Amino acid sequence: MSRILIVDDEPAIVDAVGYALRTEGFETDAADDGERALDAAANGTYDLVLLDLNLPGISGIEVCRRLRESSEVPVIMLTARDSEVDLVLGLEVGADDYVKKPFSMTELISRVRATLRRRSLDLEGDTSRRTVGDLEIDAVRHEVVVNGRSVSLTPSEFKLLARLAEHPGRVFTRRELMQHLWDSDYVGDERACDSHMANLRRKLERDPARPARLVSVRGVGYKLAAL
């Protein structure tokens, strides 16, 4: 049975989300601020964290950043904000996905299941290694090397890059990439793909403002080019 930590300072949301998750067979714990969330994560074993972006004290962004220093537990951000900067920053520090408030419980449960399913598949491992120009991807060690330089990627970034590397030069639509990321036909907001790609470009491109490796094809999606 999967165990989920709910981090939100609104009791009504914690109660509603906790009830919905338990009804679906999950175990839940809750924390109402960033400090308690970090203590809970350090002292317990969780399969996923639902993390509010706007927390009192330590922000959700900072909580996620600290979690990523010692753990690869999947994180779904809960946010009422509609700022692209906030969403990109959340993904950049290691969040796997986000759900905007107000959200339906059906949508949230679907995201939770997709994230846990993807994590399970990742843990099974993939023995393949791929090389695309000066880019090397080791799926077993979860390592990426660019021109001899090791690059740290979040689990979501790694999975998207590995998918692009399966067919260098092929254009993948945003929907295809997000379906692969979540192993689900339901992908929610496809703009999350653009946020992941922006973060990948900052880590992999010589000049992120003029990407040559992760190339966007207007009106279609993205492709990986060999350099």
Image (cartoon, rainbow, N blue to C red):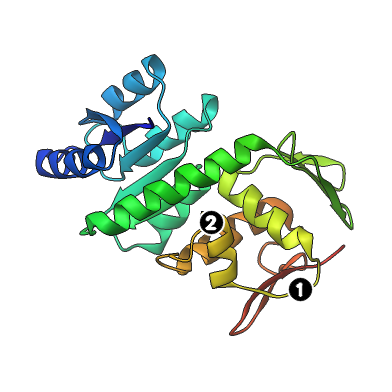
On screen, residue 156 versus residue 163, left or right, reads: left
On screen, residue 57 versus residue 62, left or right, reads: left
Q: Residue at x 33, y 40 (%)?
A: 50
The percent position of residue 123, horizontal first and vertical second, equals: 61, 35
On screen, residue 54 versus residue 184, left or right, reads: left
Location of mark 1 (residue): 170
Q: Residues within 10 Å of mark 1 (few under 14, many from 20)?
A: some
Q: Residue at x 47, y 69 (%)?
A: 190
Disc 1 marks which amino acid? Arg
The percent position of residue 128, horizontal first and vertical second, equals: 81, 45
On screen, residue 124 versus residue 95, left or right, reads: right
Towards the viewer: 55 or 161: 161
Residue 95 visible here:
no
Q: Residue at x 33, y 18 (%)?
A: 39
Q: Is residue 41 above or below residue 11?
A: above
Disc 2 marks which amino acid? Asp
